[in-house]
Amino acid sequence: MHDALETGGVSRRTLMISFGGGATVAAAMTLSPGLSLAGEAEVQAIIDQMAEAAPAEGGVDLDLPEIAENGNTVPVTFTVDAPMTADSYVKTVMVMADGNPQPEVARFHFTPESGTASASTRMRLAGTQGIIAVAQMNDGSTMMGRKLVKVTIGGCGG
């Protein structure tokens, strides 16, 4: 039985300890308390990049739970009240969470052939926060919907 690798004479045990230490450091950096969460200003900056003018409130219906007992898998469904014809259709819908480290959760692209501008997904939420969906039409106009989701921890926090 060989105690060292053929290249460089490093033992398998030393190699495994090195990899284990590196994984621990990487995990600690990910869970560091200095993790910065997005805020309304970051979300507004993303909206400003997407929209030529301030989005009209309404027109985007968000279906989310009012209270999510598990922030790891929060279901979200959106539907945009707009025609899907060759002349007027929803081009893009961006879903954002204003309290996550990365505010943009998902971006959906549509064409007139999509039939309707709606989709469902699940997202991870870092805590109680606002969810915003911004729909951009093919002519550049935008509309949006918002909803607050309260995330509890184990069903007993807030």
Image (cartoon, helix red, strand yellow):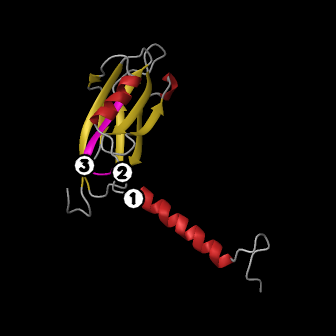
Where in the figure is residue 104, as x and y percent of width and height? 40, 38
Numbered tag placed on residue 128 in the rendering? 3
In magenta segment, residue 128: yes
Q: Amino acid at mark 2?
A: Leu
Q: Which residue is mark 2?
A: 35
Tags 2 and 1 touching, CB below 8 Å = yes
Q: Residue at x 49, y 60 (%)?
A: 26
Q: Is residue 130 left or right of residue 23?
A: left
> Spatial distance from mark 3 to mark 2, Cα to Cα?
16 Å
Mark 2 crowd level (few <14, some 14–19, many ≥20, 10 Å Cα) = few
Q: Which residue is mark 1?
A: 31
Q: Which badge, 1 or 3, comes first in the chain's sequence?
A: 1
> Spatial distance from mark 2 to mark 1, Cα to Cα?
7 Å
Where in the figure is residue 131, as x and y percent of width and height? 30, 39
Q: Residue 71 or 46: which is nearer the viewer?
A: 46
Q: Secondary structure at mark 3?
A: loop
Q: Is residue 105 above or below residue 89?
A: below
What residue range appears in magenta? 125-134
- The image quadrant that residue 71 belongs to is bottom left
Q: Is residue 28 above or below residue 105?
A: below
Q: Amino acid at mark 1?
A: Leu
Tags 3 and 2 touching, CB below 8 Å = no
Q: Residue 81 or 19: which is nearer the viewer?
A: 19
Q: Amino acid at mark 3?
A: Thr
Q: Secondary structure at mark 2?
A: loop
In magenta segment, residue 58: no
Q: Is residue 33 above or below residue 49?
A: below
